[in-house]
Image (cartoon, rainbow, N blue to C red):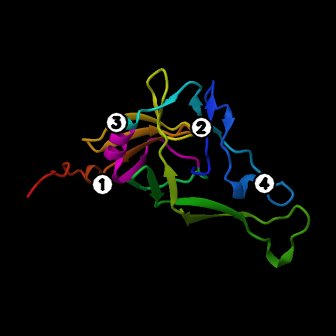
Amino acid sequence: MDHIKEPIYCDQPFTKNFPLPPEKADPPCCGCCFVQPPKVRGIPTGAKPISSEEKAQLLKDFEGSWKIVPLESAAPTLIVFTDVMVRDDYFIISGGLHNRIQQQLAAHGNNGPGQHGRPVTTAVANSSQKQTFHFFRDSADILYVDLAGSMLVKMDFAGGEVEFDNAFGKKMLWQRPWKQQGSPPPQEGMG
């Protein structure tokens, strides 16, 4: 989502379209394949960036590796990542698979008008994505972590878990790898 340069402010959630990256903004070919971008929550009008002190503490708490656990089932076309690495003011999401649906050509070249063959679904590895944190807080004290309206719902940094409700309305949990493995938190300052 680093192609989004300004906050998506709105008075009602899920009324604004997700801005497409420049390489996907123009409809391909004749436009027949263009699909309407999904709606995003956005950030409530009037939400303000958090203080530099609070931002610095949050970035320190987020620093390092996390595993992503979806908290609800995803649409078959949704891209689901498995890993997060947080560094400075950005994070890299990686791992996981998504489905790609392609039309298989009909046998013997019998592809007349309107005959595109049958759809074939293939699992494809996700490409890593870099995203920058942008923290805002609204009048209800809800913390937003990006420009499209992803919310930080629960924070338990010491316990190795944070929960998000992303800009598309999907809930997910970030867990420290030690938490996901059922281990206690690592001890600091040993030695």
Q: For the residue marked with disc 2, what is the amino acid? A: Pro
Residues at marks 2 and 3 touching, judged by CB atoms closer than 8 Å: no
* Residue at the extreme right: 113
**What element does badge 2 sit on?**
loop
Labels 4, 1: front one:
4
* Residue at the extreme top: 139
Q: CA distance from mark 4 to mark 1?
A: 40 Å
Which residue is label 2 attached to? Answer: 7
Which residue is label 4 attached to? Answer: 26
Which residue is label 3 attached to? Answer: 155
In reply to whether residue 67 is colored magenta, the answer given is yes
Q: CA distance from mark 2 to mark 4?
A: 22 Å
**What element does badge 1 sit on?**
helix
Rendered location of residue 100, percent (x, y): 63, 61
**What element does badge 3 sit on?**
strand
Among numbered discs 4 and 1, the one appearing first in the sequence: 4
Q: CA distance from mark 3 to mark 4?
A: 39 Å
Among numbered discs 2 and 3, the one appearing first in the sequence: 2
Q: Is residue 84 left or right of residue 10?
A: left
Q: For the residue marked with disc 3, what is the amino acid? A: Met
Which segment is the magenta one?
A: 55-75
Residue 26, located in which quarter of the rendered image?
bottom right
Q: Between residue 178 and residue 89, name the one nearer to us.
A: 89
